[in-house]
Image (spheres, rainbow, N blue to C red):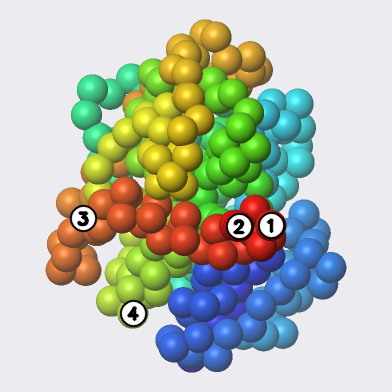
């Protein structure tokens, strides 16, 4: 089975390069060789490779920048997935795509089901929802994994930002009225491989067990690092940002547990693994 992976240089793409090879022959694309904003390049890549599975880990993830670059976000998050979906349908291939909690407005009291109606608050969420809809309307075989708050020991993400600032002894002010589930990229890649192997098709929430806030996540990072940096809790209104974010990003994982025959791991346990990996990457002088 030939698997085409886009976005291999991102935090999730790196983990997918580890998790996918046991399923078949993995072919990866990089920014230098495949421009996700070039429809012709996308079509040619798929038609030349003729994969049985297309895993699209490429995304425009700069949430604040998307507010001023709607066109750029739509090219990567909506138009590109739509093209991949059309090509997947022509081949009879499975398209694996990653959606986001930001397709919801956060007004629901409990965790969101896969069937709940989306209503994004910001340009990033709108572009991701447009991608989901393009894939669904194509009629292709699809696995849309909806996830939240993805982080890894490398790259630009919330975990790395908090860990670096805490290690440097810098003060931390973090929003405490937005609720969700931190999702380790290693976990997300493993769950994706397991879902492909199980032959699941449709939309499914893929997040760990549990819930917290950004403030709670930051405190857990600091504690796991063995540091004593104070993390001050603030409200969303105190955080200067042009982006409206959902107050509730919780995603229900009942479908995931039923499909794989086991409940997802707690986010705290996955954080501990990420901390170990991040610590191992730091210069020796910082670990002394």
Residue drawn where x is 63% and y is 28% of the image = 170
Left/right placement of residue 32 relative to residue 287 reads: right
Along the polypeptide, which appears first: circle 3 or circle 4? Answer: 4
Q: Which residue is mark 4?
A: 197
Q: Which residue is mark 2?
A: 288
Q: Which residue is mark 3?
A: 255
Residue extending furthest toward the front = 288
Q: Which residue is mark 1?
A: 285
**SS type, badge 3:** helix
Residue drawn where x is 20% and y is 66% of the image = 259
Q: Measured from the top left, where is residue 11 in percent x and y? A: 59, 59
**SS type, badge 4:** helix
| Residue 250, disc | none
Mark 2 vs mark 3, foreground winner is 2
Q: Measured from the top left, where is residue 142 in percent x and y? A: 43, 64
Q: Are marks 2 and 3 in contact (CB under 8 Å)?
A: no
Residue drawn where x is 21% and y is 68% of the image = 260
Q: Are marks 3 and 4 in contact (CB under 8 Å)?
A: no
**On screen, 253 above or below 200?**
above
**SS type, badge 2:** loop
Res. 91 in view: no
Left/right placement of residue 199 relative to residue 3 reads: left
Along the polypeptide, which appears first: circle 2 or circle 3? Answer: 3
Disc 3 residue crowd, few under 14, some 14–19, many 20+, Cα 10 Å: some
Residue extending furthest toward the right = 32
Q: Which residue is at the front of the view, 287 or 188?
A: 287
Q: Measured from the top left, where is residue 12 in percent x and y? A: 55, 61
Q: Are marks 2 and 1 in contact (CB under 8 Å)?
A: yes
**Between marks 2 and 4, how big is the CA–CA gap?**
43 Å
Q: Which residue is at the front of the view, 154 or 264?
A: 154
Q: Measured from the top left, where is residue 229 in percent x and y? A: 50, 30
């Amino acid at each position: 089975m030939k698997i085409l992976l886009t976005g291999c240089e991102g935090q999730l793409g790196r983990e997918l390069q580890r998790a996918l090879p046991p399923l078949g022959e993995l072919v990866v694309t990089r920014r230098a060789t495949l421009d996700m904003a070039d429809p012709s390049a996308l079509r040619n890549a798929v038609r030349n490779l003729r994969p049985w599975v297309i895993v699209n880990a490429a995304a425009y993830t700069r949430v604040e920048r998307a507010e001023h670059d709607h066109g750029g976000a739509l090219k990567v998050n909506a138009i590109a997935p739509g093209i991949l979906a059309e090509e997947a349908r022509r081949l009879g291939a499975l398209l694996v795509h990653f959606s986001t909690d930001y397709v919801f407005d956060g007004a629901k009291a409990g965790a969101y089901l896969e069937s709940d109606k989306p209503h994004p608050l910001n340009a990033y969420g709108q572009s991701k929802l447009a991608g989901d809809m393009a894939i669904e309307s194509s009629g292709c075989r699809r696995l849309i994994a909806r996830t939240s708050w993805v982080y890894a020991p490398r790259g630009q993400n919330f975990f790395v930002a908090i860990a670096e600032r805490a290690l440097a002894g810098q003060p931390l002010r973090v929003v405490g009225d937005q609720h969700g589930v931190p999702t380790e990229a290693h976990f997300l890649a493993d769950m994706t491989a397991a879902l492909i192997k199980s032959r699941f098709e449709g939309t499914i929430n893929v997040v760990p067990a549990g819930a917290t806030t950004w403030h709670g996540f930051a405190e857990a990072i600091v504690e796991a690092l063995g540091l004593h940096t104070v993390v001050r809790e603030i409200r969303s209104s105190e955080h200067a940002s042009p982006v409206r974010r959902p107050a509730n990003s919780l995603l229900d994982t009942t479908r995931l547990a039923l499909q794989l025959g086991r409940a997802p791991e707690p986010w705290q346990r996955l954080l501990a693994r990420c901390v170990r990996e991040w610590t191992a990457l730091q210069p020796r002088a910082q670990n002394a």
